[in-house]
Image (cartoon, helix red, strand yellow):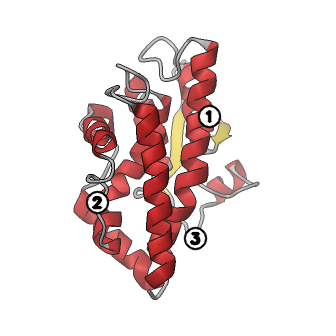
Amino acid sequence: MADEVILLDFWPSPFGVRARIALREKGVEFEYREENLRDKSPLLLQMNPVYKKIPVLIHNGKPVCESMNVVQYIDEVWSDKNPILPSDPYQRAQARFWVDFVDTKLFEPADKIWQTKGEEQETAKKEYIEALKTLESELGDKPYFGGDTFGFVDIAMTGYYSWFEASEKLANFSIEPECPTLMASAKRCLQRESVVKSLHDSEKILAFAYKIRKIYCV
């Protein structure tokens, strides 16, 4: 009996895209269901009653929530193709550490870039760049955070990579001069087939970003 795989998601989400990429890296067929986050579906509220957020992976009727938890689940269930996490326990621990860093140190300043202006936005940009520089240092001269292999940390970062251009245009700054090695890896990630199939056009993301700015009246 074939697996039933449903993904509850929202197209511009940098977190939802992680699940899409992981599923496509594994070649898993899935049903995509777009959520209206202003009017959440009964299914989303039923499947994620704690946080009521996307993405939610529903595998044979059972929900898995939180984006990188979903990615790890996908890696473990469909383990016969394209491993996402390294097999070595130490390397796995390191990958989880850097994913935690990504979502702890990048999310807040990234969010403030959209929601603020003036001095507060300038501070957010500096914090964002400093976090990216730390990640670039960890990347070193490797093509991916996973070494020669696109992996767990790369998937986490690709959600942010997909918003780089919109962030730069809205907040009038440039990432590449500050983090050229990281940007080279970002471009490499954004060219992967699984990523191309999972992301929307950058102009569509930019238009959505301007709508966010209007909502926050900044």
Q: Quadrant of residue 97?
A: top right
Residue, disc 1: 97
Q: Looking at the picture, does residue 8 appear above or below residue 62?
A: below
Q: From the image, which quarter does the N terminus lie in?
A: top right
Give the amino acid at mark 1.
Answer: Phe
Residue, disc 3: 39
What residue is at 52 percent from the left and 63 percent from the top?
109
Q: Position of residue 19 (x, y in %)?
A: 49, 39
Question: Residue lying furthest right in this view?
Answer: 50
Q: Nearer the viewer, residue 177 or 146?
A: 177
Q: Choose mark 1 or mark 2, whichever is in front.
A: 1
Give the amino acid at mark 2.
Answer: Glu
What residue is at 51 percent from the left and 71 percent from the top?
112
Circle 3 packing at 10 Å, graded few (<14), some (14-19), many (20+), is: few
Q: Nearer the viewer, residue 79 or 108?
A: 108
- Residue 165, which numbered label? 2
Query: Closer to the N terminus: mark 1 or mark 2?
Result: 1
CB under 8 Å between discs 1 and 2: no
At mark 1, the secondary structure is: helix
Q: Nearer the viewer, residue 94 or 39?
A: 94
The answer for how far apart the CA atoms under marks 1 and 2 are is 26 Å
Give the amino acid at mark 3.
Answer: Asp
Query: Closer to the N terminus: mark 3 or mark 1?
Result: 3
| Residue 212 seen in this snapshot | yes
At mark 2, the secondary structure is: helix
Query: Closer to the N terminus: mark 2 or mark 3?
Result: 3
The answer for how far apart the CA atoms under marks 2 and 3 are is 28 Å
Q: Position of residue 52 (x, y in %)?
A: 67, 58
